[in-house]
């Protein structure tokens, strides 16, 4: 496995956990415990688009910053 492939795999694992938290947040919106947030939706889109930006030098510090409202569901 190349270094780039390793970086992509690392991001996929990281993103999987973040997206589970996003799903919980969305469920909370449906149930009225949270309100919709355009910043969270922009982060979600950035996370979906990020794999095209990964290079061999990409680190977790380069990943889109997880919004606080999502962090509480991690």
Image: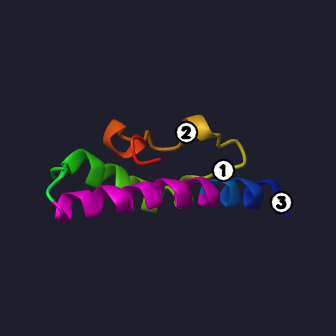
Local SS, label 1: loop
**Of the residues under marks 1 and 3, which one precedes in the sequence?**
3
Q: Residues within 10 Å of mark 3 (few under 14, many from 20)?
A: few
**Where is residue 14 drawn, in percent x and y?**
59, 53
Q: Nearer the viewer, mark 2 or mark 1?
A: 2
Tally of marks: 3
Q: Is residue 1 left or right of residue 47?
A: right
Kindly identify the residue that appears in the image at 35 percent across and 36 percent down. 68
Is residue 48 magenta-colored? no
Residue 24 on the magenta segment? yes
- Residue at 27 percent of width and 55 percent of height: 41
Mark 1 → mark 3, Cα distance in angstroms? 11 Å
Residue 70: percent from the left, percent from the top? 37, 46
User: CB of mark 2 within 8 Å of CB of mark 1?
Assistant: no
Cβ–Cβ below 8 Å for labels 1 and 3?
A: no
The residue at which mark 2 appears reads as 62
Task: Name the quadrant of the N terminus.
Answer: bottom right
Q: Write down the residue under mark 3.
A: 2
Marking on residue 55: 1
Q: Residue 17: x percent and y percent?
A: 54, 56
Residue drawn 70% across the image and 53% down it: 7
Q: Position of residue 37 (x, y in %)?
A: 19, 49
> Residue at coordinates 55% horizontally, 39% vertically from top-left?
62
The CA distance from mark 3 to mark 2 is: 19 Å
Foreground residue, 10 or 58?
10
The residue range painted magenta reads 12-31
Q: Residues within 10 Å of mark 2 (few under 14, many from 20)?
A: few
Say whether marks 3 and 2 touch (CB < 8 Å). no
């Amino acid at each position: 496995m190349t270094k780039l492939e390793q970086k992509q795999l690392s991001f996929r694992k990281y993103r999987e956990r973040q997206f589970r938290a996003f799903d919980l947040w969305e469920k909370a919106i449906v149930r009225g415990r949270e309100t919709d947030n355009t910043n969270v939706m922009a982060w979600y889109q950035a996370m979906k688009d990020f794999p095209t930006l990964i290079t061999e030098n990409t680190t977790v510090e380069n990943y889109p910053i997880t919004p606080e409202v999502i962090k509480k569901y991690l």
